Image: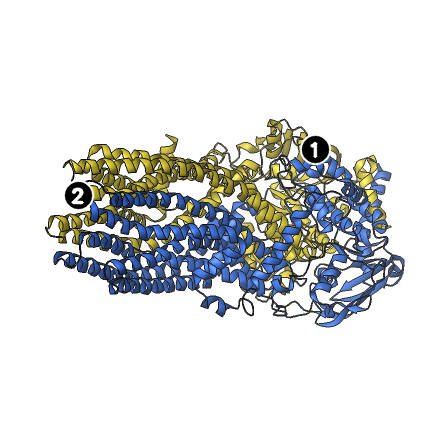
């Protein structure tokens, strides 16, 4: 990484990694992690506020202070109004005395402050909201990417939770806003109003009314929580609907047009959406009716309180000041909202899902986030010698599969040498890469790196091992960032790391020296030169100034990324079908240059193209989950086995073609 | 006029999505709006009762009654509003699918500005809410009337207080509007942030994310990108909060003056104690009313904007249906397909040309003149990015040429009904869609009408060499694909490709078959088997209907089977001829072929 001197973002990075650790700590927060029960026992409001506090302590404190003041004012206002009105007849008759003027001035100040404090509350809410959206997004990414294993990500339960959180994370944002704003204000003003009413009239009146409010709040929250349960139980149709929607909105654009699928996708979306919502709506309808009854009960309490006050006023038990104070107070308690509480319960539930994601790891049960609190591995740590990698009688079965994909596979990748692997589709070639990278552990057998079994490594050590591996896999990464970033990410760092390079002042200072070097090695100099803004071109058509690459061009970028990783110290190069999308010239360049690229590293190239594997001195043939042959091209051609059969089949077509061409040439 | 059309779309959307509930919501909204000020008036009546020693009961009853009705209305309105919103969202989402998919071209997916707009409409679908929101305006209006009436009843001049209160409210609304504009302008940052995180959520990219150690770097990119958006937004919020606060200070002064004035009138016997109390009580109501007027104005402005975009999409879709293209495709091809001096530049390139950005404005195809004879198989060969795929896309009329025309038996493709033309073609692509449906549907949508025909499915699967894929699935054709779904099975890239090929072979009598590197991820044996099986069928079809097959491949073993080979370079046609002719000619093709064949000697 040191090659990029003076990169101005170093301090910010440090801040970010501190933040990351904060996420980790946050997700593991509470005794024994956030196991569902403890989380649920804590009240929703406190939970959301704590969450906001962890993210934005000062902003939250400011916002809450504003809310407390507003609440105090809400209590003070009716009292002041009552005082003012009570003194009115006298003041009108005899002129305003200083006490009356003081009350009026206070009242006006209260009104003004109320409006201004509302603005403070909103500004803080906006800020918190932005941070919450970011935190939820990052936490989700962190939860599924921070551990070296892939079992979590491949687990359908985890994935379905990810989808759930992804679809509804906005509820957290909305709920936090509500919790630190209207809800807290509601609670505070309710308390204040009740106290004020107690002082003004008597104590059982507010007690009864608050009891009514609490009862209804509990009831409403339960109702909403139950709707939520129903909702999360219905995610299958919801997922199908969302999937159809996304495909319809562009992901399957070509297929939809060519096969005339507009109506089909629309129908799929509608049917699934309806199936997802129908039970939810039914339940909600039922709930609403019950709820009216409960609400009605509370209105009766309020009406009773009003009547009692009226009766007392009639028989002279309460004076003008008291009546004028009590009536607005009663109205205020009677109208206190209960729905908001239920609604923030939804956000809290989604937050629980998000936190559960962080601890979900079927393989070890260790909280993902806690394990990830380790310092990020900044660059590959190598020993100076490329490793020897041995697959020793490896058998592997995917978690939900019936049959092993690899069974009894043994092979050796000698230190610093190039090895090729051939095999037909589905033979298990890509699985082998996952095992080599330590993202999965074999059922039986061992994967040994310089004699050390990968399965015995802890997460930190496994992550360090992974940094030594520079892969290009079949589903290689294509990021909507600029070309420079897409290559530079091979180092685990960004180059620009942003898409507003046209306006960003730092863009001019970006140094592409190291990138150029890699580009030359990877043979993509021409590709970069063709891009409208060179390295700074965003590789996404939907970004202004951006462009889309073809599959082959992307593959060359992916290859360059792997080489960039080698340049900063990775010493295992793994190329999984690196030529699949390449054109003839690019493939030929790759073939010619491969052995050169693979110098000083242990390398594995996987391909079904013989043109790619042929020059490699050691070739393994993978079939039915095991190695059936090994040797150089020449050696394997001597043995009458799989390799020779496959090679001859492919070669025959070229030979025939060439002969045919010669023949027709000769005839004419 | 435009705003009216937009508002009308709002109404129409609500009515179509959920007529009954929308109506009920409208009623409850109005009722609660009217009743809330009434309960305040009830308190005033009760206080007057105490001071004048008349009955307090009319006031108490009015307050209690108003409370009861508004509570019930509000209780029903909450959940019902949610349901209405969800119904509207379902309706709008469905309509969005219709609008985007019914545009026969795909250029709207690739234009940055259009993509931005689309994603905004998509996101706003949840906010397009019920028409009852429009009626909160009624609440604001009725609230205003009540407040004005009450102030007026004391003395007409007092109504000016409300006018003063409108100033800060208006500033606030302008701020809101400004912020929304900013929010939308920075939409791309949000898209980037979420896309980057989506990469981390994708199991297939898990190995690379881990080996390159991308977790932290990508989180940083996502975080900074989201910050780029929320930072300016918070700053703007803060700035307008200051402006608004100053406005409220002005209101406070005006209100104090009003109180003093009415008090003075009372001193002179022109007003009652009740009047002064009313003015004191109504202070918060005035500022609430002013805010709600301003809020409603901005709500409507916002809705006009959101629905404006929605309407824009509807108009765009309606304008791009190629309604003039009504000619029927021929039943069989006699002459074949011709490119007649075709130029083509991608929409992004056109946008760049408008912006005078020469580097981006490079046309994808220049002056293509080419005949694909009826009944033949034509192969396009060339480097990545040479323009082969673009040629293929023009044949499917996924785009229209910038200049020149594609002729189908002499009839310009632009005149053929695009839907009917596509019914007579089929295609397999390298970047095919992995449709995560039931396996039967994922293949069957290749001929959607016959997707239930198991024999047809079996045949297509056999031709696409997808038998082993189906055989590996526990429930065969009835297996759900895609791990995100319950019981769903994940497939490898090669397996998906076979299914996509089977899909392409579902249609039986296409006039045009486009195979744009659909076998890149397959091993050569599988590819060979596919083309041998398909080739036989294609020849028969070619002989009867004059069908043309266009294939793009990097494998010369496949390419050489074609009757005509076209070498494309830099958006132009460099060479054409049969394999033998081209090899003999010793040009570009011969060179490429030799390069490839060398590995096999």
Chain identifier, yellow in the render: B
Q: Residues within 10 Å of mark 2 (few under 14, many from 20)?
A: many
Q: Specify the subunit that label 1 lies on.
A: B
Quarter containing the C terminus of chain A: top right
**Which lettered chain is shown in blue?**
A
Q: Residue at x 78, y 49 (%)?
A: A563
For label 2, the SS is: helix
Q: Which residue is mark 1?
A: B571
Residue B504 picture location, percent across and down: 60, 49
- Is residue B540 depicted above or below A316 in this figure? above
Residue A585 x %, y %:
79, 42
What numbered label is drawn on residue B471? none
Residue A578 locus on image (x, y percent): 75, 51
Residue denoted by label 2: B273
Furthest toward the bottom, the residue is A444
Alpha-carbon neighbours of circle 1 within 10 Å: few (<14), some, or many (≥20)? many
Residue lying farthest left?
B54
User: Is residue B452 visible to the viewer in this orientation of the structure?
Assistant: no
Instruction: Give the mark nearer the N terminus: 2 vs 1.
Output: 2
Q: Quadrant of residue A474?
A: bottom right
């Amino acid at each position: 990484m040191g090659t990029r001197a003076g990169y101005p973002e170093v301090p910010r990075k440090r801040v970010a990694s501190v933040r990351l650790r904060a996420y980790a700590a946050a997700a593991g927060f509470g005794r024994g992690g956030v196991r569902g029960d403890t989380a649920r026992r804590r009240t929703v409001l406190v939970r959301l506020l704590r969450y906001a506090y962890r993210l934005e302590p000062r902003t939250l404190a400011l916002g809450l202070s504003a809310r407390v003041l507003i609440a105090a004012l809400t209590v003070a206002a009716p009292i002041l109004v009552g005082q003012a009105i009570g003194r009115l007849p006298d003041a009108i008759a005899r002129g305003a005395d200083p006490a009356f003027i003081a009350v009026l001035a206070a009242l006006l100040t209260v009104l003004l402050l109320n409006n201004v404090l509302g603005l403070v509350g909103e500004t803080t809410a906006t800020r918190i909201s932005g941070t919450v959206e970011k935190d939820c997004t990052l936490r989700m990414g962190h939860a599924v990417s921070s551990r070296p294993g892939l079992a979590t990500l491949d687990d359908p339960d985890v994935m379905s939770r990810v989808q759930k959180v992804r679809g509804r994370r906005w509820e957290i944002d909305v709920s936090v806003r509500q919790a630190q704003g209207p809800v807290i204000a509601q609670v505070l003003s309710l308390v204040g109003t009740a106290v004020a009413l107690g002082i003004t009239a008597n104590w059982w009146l507010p007690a009864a009314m608050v009891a009514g409010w609490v009862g209804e709040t509990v009831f409403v929250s339960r109702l909403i929580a139950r709707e939520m349960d129903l909702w999360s139980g219905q995610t299958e149709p919801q997922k199908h609907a969302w999937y159809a929607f996304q495909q319809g909105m562009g992901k399957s654009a070509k297929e939809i047009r060519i096969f005339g699928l507009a109506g089909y996708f629309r129908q799929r979306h509608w049917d699934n959406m309806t199936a997802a919502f129908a039970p939810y709506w039914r339940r909600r309808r039922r709930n609403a009716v019950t709820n009216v009854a409960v609400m009605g009960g509370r209105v009766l309490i309020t009406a009773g309180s009003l009547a009692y006050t009226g009766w007392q006023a009639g028989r002279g038990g309460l004076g003008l000041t008291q009546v004028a104070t009590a009536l607005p107070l009663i109205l205020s308690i009677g109208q206190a909202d209960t729905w908001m509480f239920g609604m923030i319960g939804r956000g809290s539930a989604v937050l629980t899902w998000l936190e559960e994601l962080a601890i979900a790891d079927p393989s070890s049960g260790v909280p993902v986030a806690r394990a990830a609190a380790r310092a990020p591995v900044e660059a590959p740590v190598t020993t100076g010698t490329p490793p020897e990698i041995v697959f020793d009688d490896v058998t592997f079965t995917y978690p939900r599969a019936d049959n092993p994909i690899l069974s009894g596979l043994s092979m050796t990748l000698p230190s610093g040498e190039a090895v090729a692997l051939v095999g037909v589709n589905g033979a298990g070639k890509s699985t082998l890469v996952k095992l080599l990278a330590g993202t999965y552990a074999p059922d039986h057998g061992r994967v040994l790196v310089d004699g050390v079994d990968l399965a015995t490594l802890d997460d930190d050590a496994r992550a360090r091992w992974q940094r030594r591996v520079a892969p290009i896999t079949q589903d290689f990464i294509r990021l909507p960032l600029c070309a420079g970033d897409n290559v530079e990410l091979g180092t685990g760092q960004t180059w620009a790391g942003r898409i507003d390079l046209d306006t960003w002042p730092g863009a001019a200072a970006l140094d592409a020296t190291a990138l150029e070097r890699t580009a030359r090695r990877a043979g993509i100099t021409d590709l970069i030169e063709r891009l409208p803004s060179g390295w700074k071109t965003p590789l996404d058509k939907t970004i202004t100034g951006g462009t889309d690459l073809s599959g082959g061009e992307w593959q060359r970028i992916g290859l360059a990324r792997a080489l960039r990783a080698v340049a900063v110290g990775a010493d295992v190069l793994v190329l999984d079908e690196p030529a699949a999308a390449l054109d003839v010239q690019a493939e030929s360049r790759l073939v010619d240059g491969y052995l050169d690229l693979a110098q000083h590293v242990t390398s594995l190239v996987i391909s079904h193209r013989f043109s790619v594997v042929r020059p490699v001195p050691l070739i393994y043939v993978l079939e039915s989950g095991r190695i059936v042959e090994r040797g150089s091209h020449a050696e394997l051609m001597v043995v009458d086995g799989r390799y020779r059969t496959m090679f001859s089949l492919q070669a025959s077509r070229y030979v025939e073609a060439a002969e045919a061409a010669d023949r027709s040439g000769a005839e004419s | 006029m435009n705003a009216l059309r937009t508002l009308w779309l709002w109404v129409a959307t609500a009515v179509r999505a959920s007529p009954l509930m929308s109506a009920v919501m409208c009623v409850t909204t109005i009722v609660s709006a009217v009743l809330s000020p009434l309960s305040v008036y009830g308190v005033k009546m009760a206080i007057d009762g105490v001071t004048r020693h008349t009955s307090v009961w009319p006031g108490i009853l009015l307050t209690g009654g108003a409370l009861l009705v508004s509570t019930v209305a509000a209780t029903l309105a909450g959940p019902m509003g949610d349901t209405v919103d969800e119904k509207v969202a379902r309706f709008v989402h469905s309509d969005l699918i219709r609008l985007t998919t019914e545009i026969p071209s795909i250029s709207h997916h690739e234009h940055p500005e259009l993509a931005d707009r689309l994603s905004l409409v998509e996101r706003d679908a949840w906010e397009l809410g019920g028409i009852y929101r429009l009626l909160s305006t009624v609440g604001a209006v009725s609230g205003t009337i009540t407040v004005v009436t009450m102030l007026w009843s004391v003395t007409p001049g007092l109504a000016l207080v409300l006018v003063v209160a409108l100033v800060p409210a208006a500033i606030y609304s302008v701020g809101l509007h400004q912020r929304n504009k900013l929010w939308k302008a920075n939409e791309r940052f949000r898209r980037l942030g979420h896309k980057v995180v989506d990469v981390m959520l994708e199991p297939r990219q898990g190995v690379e994310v881990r080996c390159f150690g991308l977790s932290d770097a990508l989180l940083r990119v996502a975080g900074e990108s989201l910050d780029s958006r929320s930072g300016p937004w918070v700053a703007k919020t803060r700035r307008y909060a200051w402006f608004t606060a100053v406005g409220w200070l002005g209101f406070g002064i005006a209100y104090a003056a009003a109180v003093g004035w009415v008090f003075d009138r009372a001193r002179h016997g022109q007003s009652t104690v009740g009047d002064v109390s009313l003015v004191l009580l109504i202070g918060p109501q005035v500022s609430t009313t002013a805010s709600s007027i301003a809020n409603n104005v901005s709500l409507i402005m916002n809705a006009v904007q959101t629905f404006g975009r929605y309407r824009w999409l509807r108009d765009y879709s309606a304008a791009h249906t190629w309604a003039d293209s009504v000619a029927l495709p021929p039943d069989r091809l006699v002459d074949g397909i011709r490119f007649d001096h075709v130029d083509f530049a991608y929409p992004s390139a056109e946008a760049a040309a408008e912006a005078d950005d020469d580097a981006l404005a490079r046309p994808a195809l220049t002056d293509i003149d080419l005949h694909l004879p009826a009944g033949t198989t034509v192969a396009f060969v060339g480097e990545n990015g040479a323009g082969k795929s673009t040629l293929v896309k023009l044949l499917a009329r996924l785009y229209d040429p910038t200049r020149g025309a594609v002729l189908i038996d002499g009839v310009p493709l632009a005149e053929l009904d695009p839907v009917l033309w596509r019914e007579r073609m089929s295609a397999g692509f390298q970047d095919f869609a992995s449709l995560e449906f039931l396996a039967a549907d994922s293949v069957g949508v290749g001929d959607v009408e016959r997707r239930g025909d198991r024999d047809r499915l079996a045949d297509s699967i056999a031709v696409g060499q997808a038998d082993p894929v189906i055989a590996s699935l526990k429930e065969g054709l009835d297996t759900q694909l895609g791990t995100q779904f319950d019981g769903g099975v994940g497939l490898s890239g090669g397996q998906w490709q076979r299914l996509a090929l089977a899909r392409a072979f579902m249609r039986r009598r296409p006039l045009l078959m486009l195979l744009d590197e659909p076998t890149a991820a397959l091993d050569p044996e599988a590819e060979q088997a596919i083309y041998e099986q398909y080739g036989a069928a294609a020849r028969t079809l070619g002989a009867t209907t004059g069908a043309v097959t266009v294939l793009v491949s990097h494998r010369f073993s496949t390419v050489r089977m074609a009757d005509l080979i076209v070498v494309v370079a830099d958006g132009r046609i460099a060479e054409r001829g049969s394999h033998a002719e081209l090899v003999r000619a010793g040009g570009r093709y011969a060179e490429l072929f030799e390069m490839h064949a060398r590995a096999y000697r």
